[in-house]
Amino acid sequence: MPDPASTPAPAPAAPASPRRSDATRTAILEAARERFATDGYERATIRSIAKDARIDPSMVMRYYGNKEGLFAAAVAVDLKLPALDAVPRAEVGRALAAHFFDMWEDNEVLTALLRVGVTNQAGAERMQAICRNQLLPVAAQVCPDPEQVATRAALCAAQVLGLALTRYVLQFPPATALVREEVVAWLAPTLQRYLTAPSP
Amino acid sequence: MPDPASTPAPAPAAPASPRRSDATRTAILEAARERFATDGYERATIRSIAKDARIDPSMVMRYYGNKEGLFAAAVAVDLKLPALDAVPRAEVGRALAAHFFDMWEDNEVLTALLRVGVTNQAGAERMQAICRNQLLPVAAQVCPDPEQVATRAALCAAQVLGLALTRYVLQFPPATALVREEVVAWLAPTLQRYLTAPSP
DNA sequence: AGTGTTGGTCAACGACTGTTGACAGAGTAG
DNA sequence: CTACTCTGTCAACAGTCGTTGACCAACACT
C-alpha cells in the first residue's frame, strides 16, 4: 500500500537508522522551511526548493511523496510553552508575551506555518491543532472558568498571530521597529487580561 | 504608451461615461473579490474568475490589463472610520472595536485583502497604505504622544487583523463562535489601552 | 444605406507546475 | 568478482497558468 509520507526504511522497527541520504533529507527540509516561510505554499515550488538544496526535484518526491508530505515533514512546531501554574498569577501575561517573542524571533517554521495556513487548508488545520494541543492546556492552568478556556486561548492566539502577521509577514514599519521589551510591555497586559480577567 | 490599468474610455475627460459593458465589468469585479477572498492571490485564477462571471478570460485582460490590474481594481478599501474626537475619550476602544466588527462581518473585500497581503507583495503594500492613510489619522486624534501614533496604530491593527485572521481566514472554532457583543467586549479594552494608555 | 467602434468568443502560445519512470554510479554483503 | 540496494541525474508527461491575437456580432453615427 502506498505510504508516501513515511521514509522507505528497510527495517520498520528501527528507531534510528542513520542513512547515507540524511544530509540530503535535512537539506531539503531546511530549504523547504525557508521557501515556505518567504513564499507561502503555492509559490514555494518543489523545483525552487530542490534548487536551494542543490539536488534534483525528483528526490523530494522520493523522500517525501508529494508536496503535502514535504510540508508536513518540514513544518513541525513545538511552542515549548512553559507551565503557567509555576509562575506568579499576575505575571502569566508577561511570561507568555516574552516566550512568544523569543519563539517567533528566531524560528522561521512559525512564519512558514502562518504564511501557509492562510492559503492552504492543511496549514490552517495544522495551526488549529497546535493551538488546541499546546496552547489550550497551558491556558487551562490559569483560566478561572473551564468553559471559557477555548475562548480565552483563541483571543491570545489572535493577539499573538496579529502581531506576528504585521511584524514578520506584512512587515509594517512600526511593527518591525519595536524591540523586545516594547513588544512584551505592550502585549503582556492584553494576554494577562484575556487569560485571567473576569469575563466582560 | 500602454496603460493597462485604466479603462479605454473614448473621452478622457468624461467623469462618468456609462458603457454598454458596465454590467460585465462589475460582474468581473464581484467574482474577483469573491475568489480573492476565498482562494488568495495565486489560487484565484483568471480562468476561475471569468467562469464565475460567465465570460471569457480574455475579457478580464482587456478590461483590467493583467492580473495585478484586476486585483488593484477589485480591492478598494474604505474603512469608513468614525472621527474619534467626537466620541468620549473613555469609549474610543469600544467604538473602534464595534466599527471594525461591523466592517469585517459583511465585507469580503477585507478578507480578500488579508488573504492576498500574506502572499503578495502588492497586497501587503496596499494594507500598509490603508493603515497609514486611514487608521493613522484617526489614531492621531486620541493618542497622547504624537511620536507614538504610528506604534499605537500598528498595535491596534495587529489586534484587529489577528482576530480577523483567526475568525475569517483560519476559522478557529472558538473565534468563529463569538458573537458581536463578545468580540467588542473583549477587544474594546485592548484597543482603548493601545490608543490612550500611557506608554508602558 | 454603410462605416467604424465596442462587446464578446475561440483557439492557441510559451512558460511553469507537480509528478513519474528510466537509467547510471557508489556502497555493501556474499 | 558478482549481486543488490541506495542515492542521485535526466528527460519527459499531462495539466494549468497568464496572456495574446484573430475573428465575429451588435450597436452608433452620418
Image (spheres, coloured by chain):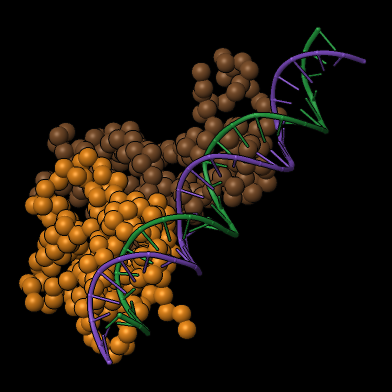
Chain colours: A orange, B brown, C purple, D green
Q: Is residue A180 left or right of residue B99?
A: left
Q: Residue at x 46, y 80 (%)?
A: A2
Q: Is residue B108 left or right of residue B172?
A: right
Dividing the picture into quadrants, the one containing residue B30 is top right
Dividing the picture into quadrants, the one containing residue C10 is top right
Q: Residue at x 35, y 52 (%)?
A: A48
Pick the front one: B56 or A66: A66
Q: Residue at x 63, y 17 (%)?
A: B10
One can see residue B170 in this view: no
Pick the front one: B199 or A125: A125
Q: Position of residue A181 (x, y in %)?
A: 8, 52
**What quarter of the picture does the C terminus of chain A occupy?**
bottom left
Q: Is residue D1 above or below residue A119?
A: below
Q: Is residue A39 above or below residue B153?
A: below
Q: Position of residue B119 (x, y in %)?
A: 38, 49
Q: Position of residue A143 (x, y in %)?
A: 21, 74
Q: Position of residue B2 (x, y in %)?
A: 51, 22
Q: Residue at x 28, y 90 (%)?
A: A13
One can see residue B52 in this view: yes
Q: Is residue A12 left or right of residue B60?
A: left
- Count the numbered circles shown: 0
Pick the front one: C25 or A195: C25
